[in-house]
Amino acid sequence: MAAGLAVLLDEDGLVLVHDAARALAPPELFQRVIHALREGRGAVIPGMAVADTIKAVDSSGVVTATLDRAALRAIQTPQGFGRAVLTHAHGENHDAVVTDDAALVELTGAPIHVVDGDAWAAKITTRDDLDMAERRLSRVGS
């Protein structure tokens, strides 16, 4: 990511980070993230409400807590950032082990705003995911 940030032009104030595994993310999702950034948010991520009950489990497989799903979101991409916010996060936390750029920003203490995600932006990483995407696409235009 540092290499990508390094080649941005000075006038590039907004940065979107997108996961290629979310190949069906619709343009409207990108527009929601960009709109929130243009309203002055420094970090914006799309998220879907969690429908399942989520349990925290320790290393021996014992449930330690049931999490309040009303406060949980499954986070998607594109994730959007003000360039300065993302550059600062990468500089401050370049050795951190995280699963997304928003986690780096989170480590700086900067607020991260969530906009509505989209079911079409589901991650396609397994054969079952691909089958689901193919079924969904086969219904488009039918």
Image (cartoon, grey):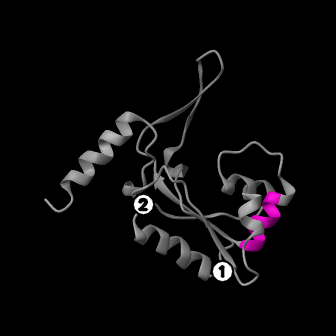
Rendered image: mark on residue 116: none
Image x and y of residue 92, in percent = 86, 57
Residue kind at label 2, given as amino acid type: Ala
Q: In screen coordinates, is 67 left or right of 83?
A: left
Asked whether the beta carbons under mark 2 and mark 1 sit within 8 Å of each other, the answer is no
Rendered image: mark on residue 40: 1
Q: CA distance from mark 2 to mark 1?
A: 23 Å
* Residue at 58% across, 17% down: 61
Judge depth for marks 2 and 1 and give the one in front. 2
Query: Residue 142 lies in what quarter of the image?
Result: bottom left
**Relative vertical location of residue 88 with respect to residue 134 in this rendering, above or below:** below
Quick one: label 2, few (<14), some, or many (20+) residues within 10 Å? many
User: To which residue does mark 2 refer?
Assistant: 25
Residue kind at label 1, given as amino acid type: Gly
Q: Secondary structure at mark 2?
A: loop
Image x and y of residue 73, in percent = 52, 51
